Amino acid sequence: MSGYFENQPQVIVVFLALGLLTALSNYFSIRRFDQYPRASAFPRVSVLIPARNEAANIEACVRSLLEQDYPDYEVIVLDDHSEDETRLILNRLVQSLRRASDSASERLRVLDGRPLPDGWLGKHWACHQLAQAATGELLLFTDADTRHAPNMLRDSVSALLAERADLITAFPREEAVTWGEKLIIPVIGFGVFSFLPVTLARWLRWAGLSVTIGQFMLFRRAAFEAIGGYEAVRNHLVDDVMLGRRIIQHGFTWRLMDGTRHVSCRMYRGFWQAVDGFTKNIFAFFDYRLSLFVIAWAWMAVTFLAPAFVVAAHAVNLPVDSYPYPLACLAVIESLAMWALAYDRFRVPLYLVFFYPVSFGLFVLIAFRSLVYTLLGQSTWKGRELAPPVWKW
């Protein structure tokens, strides 16, 4: 054991080198929607939006979807028992489109959610109802806080058809306004780029190496129904990740793409909303495996925070003799390169790279908050309590 701790700086440098290779591979292999030729024919698409307490977002989202330059699609919004003015705003939007004799009114449908049955999470039940109401050959699930460029449907469907994919998921451009958002939200993109080798996930069809992003999931309906749809993941918090893994496990084709030029999203508004949002999901991403979760986050904390601490201490003439300064500098340079690749691709301001120890330190705290809140059954989201999961060692 003592030998391990003596060699830990070297192990960290090697680990970060592998992460940097992964980030480089993802940077050059993940394609954008508009890098594919335009399809010769476009199947009907159902754009599906679950909405609960989305008064601040819903109109801008729906309007951006109604302005798509796509020949055959519908937009279905389900009001999931909102306690704010979401339904009122949707009603006003429908009425204004009809008064203006806007053809978009024929593409828009607004549904009221049915009562939540036992054993279902709220958003999952809403998405299940949306899928049942859809008439398209393709199903696009997106969130109410997204905005879409007019060519989003045309380019994403062209990409799906060119790749012969059954599911295309894409990371949007995540908007961060406050400093709390800027420090926390981009960490997710960094994690995807640095630790999930997308090329290997595609070639080897390893579901565990995949990530699916709920803000944009474009399914072939036949594949979605074959994997059991939302009913198959009705009580799993990270429904998007699990749906993507089921696509791969059932022999269908999954693709992760860059949607930053076509979709934007302000995921959370303010520091505490971001903290609460990630608290809900992080432990679930590890499939509630306690030992894996603790070991992974402890190792990541040491990997990214220890070298930065050593370099900072040396800068103020407080050298840490037990950790070689040259190796700490090398580890910090590797870390900066990894964060820069992710931030550049996710269109995050690059000056935030230099705050990575703060960002990652905050995220480690949020991760363990997720563990505690989930195990104690204290997790809530949008006014609903989330039932404690069955966790595993």
Image: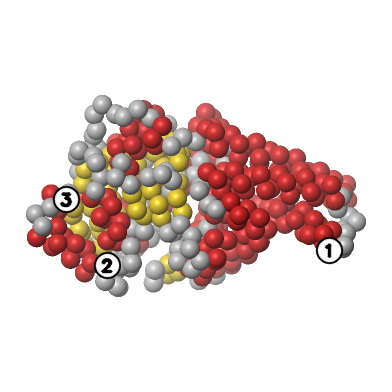
What residue lies at 35% left-to-right and 27% top-to-bottom?
A: 37
Do the CB atoms of the residues marked 2 and 3 lie less than 8 Å apart?
A: no
Q: CA distance from mark 1 to mark 2?
A: 53 Å
Label 1 SS: loop
Write down the quadrant of residue 220 in the picture.
Answer: top left
Q: CA distance from mark 1 to mark 3?
A: 62 Å
What residue lies at 26% left-to-right and 55% top-to-bottom?
A: 62
- Asked if residue 134 can be seen in this view, the reply is no
Q: Is residue 4 above or below residue 159?
A: below
Label ID, residue 104: 3
Position of residue 179 in the picture relative to residue 331 (left or right): left
Q: CA distance from mark 2 to mark 3?
A: 19 Å
Write down the quadrant of residue 362 in the picture.
Answer: bottom right
What residue lies at 33% left-to-right and 49% top-to-bottom?
A: 148
Image spot of residue 82 (x, y percent): 29, 69
Q: Amino acid at mark 2?
A: Thr
The mark nearer the N terminus, 2 or 3, is 2
* 1 or 2: mark nearer the eye: 1
Write down the quadrant of residue 305 in the picture.
Answer: bottom right
Q: Is residue 16 above or below residue 238?
A: above
Q: Is residue 100 above or below residue 206?
A: below
Q: Amino acid at mark 1?
A: Val
